[in-house]
Image: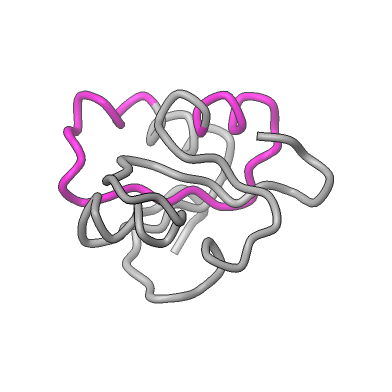
């Protein structure tokens, strides 16, 4: 599997991350800055909303992890609402 390919994994990297972004806009900005190590996208997110982020991740070689639902991604980020996307950031990078 190449970086930027979609895959489904169950892990705690997002929950345990010291630095992360939540939401498509902030996650896209972190990928553009080269700050994102790993991007998470919810399967049930509107593809029109996340398509630019997915293309950017593929272009930049940032691995993409697909999660089942926006609600699950939101919980992993510690918020009470769903999230379309999130990222684990490099150490020392700000969201």
In this view, the residue farthest toward the right is: 92
Q: Quadrant of the N terminus?
A: bottom left
Q: Where residue 40 sits: x, y (%)?
A: 42, 51
Q: Is residue 38 above or below residue 14?
A: above
At x 84% / y 45%, what residue is drawn?
92
- Residue toward you, 89 or 2: 89
Q: Where residue 31 sits: x, y (%)?
A: 59, 32
> Which of the 4 image quadrants contains residue 83?
top left
Q: Is residue 68 above or below residue 44?
A: below
Q: Where residue 21 sits: x, y (%)?
A: 55, 40
Locate residue 45 relative to residue 11 in the image: left or right: left
Locate residue 58 relative to residue 51 in the image: left or right: right
Q: Is-magenta flag for residue 36?
A: yes
At x 29% / y 29%, what residue is drawn?
51
Q: Magenta region: which residues?
A: 27-52
> Which of the 4 image quadrants contains residue 53?
top left
Locate residue 91 relative to residue 42 in the image: left or right: right
């Amino acid at each position: 599997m190449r970086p930027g390919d979609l895959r489904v994994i169950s892990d705690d990297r997002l929950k345990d991350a010291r630095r992360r972004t939540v939401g498509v806009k902030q996650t896209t900005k972190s990928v553009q800055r080269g700050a994102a190590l790993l991007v998470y996208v919810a399967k049930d997110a509107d593809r029109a909303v996340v398509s630019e982020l997915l293309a950017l991740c593929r272009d930049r070689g940032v691995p993409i992890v697909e999660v089942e639902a926006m609600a699950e991604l939101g919980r992993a980020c510690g918020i009470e609402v769903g999230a379309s996307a999130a990222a684990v950031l490099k150490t020392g990078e700000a969201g």
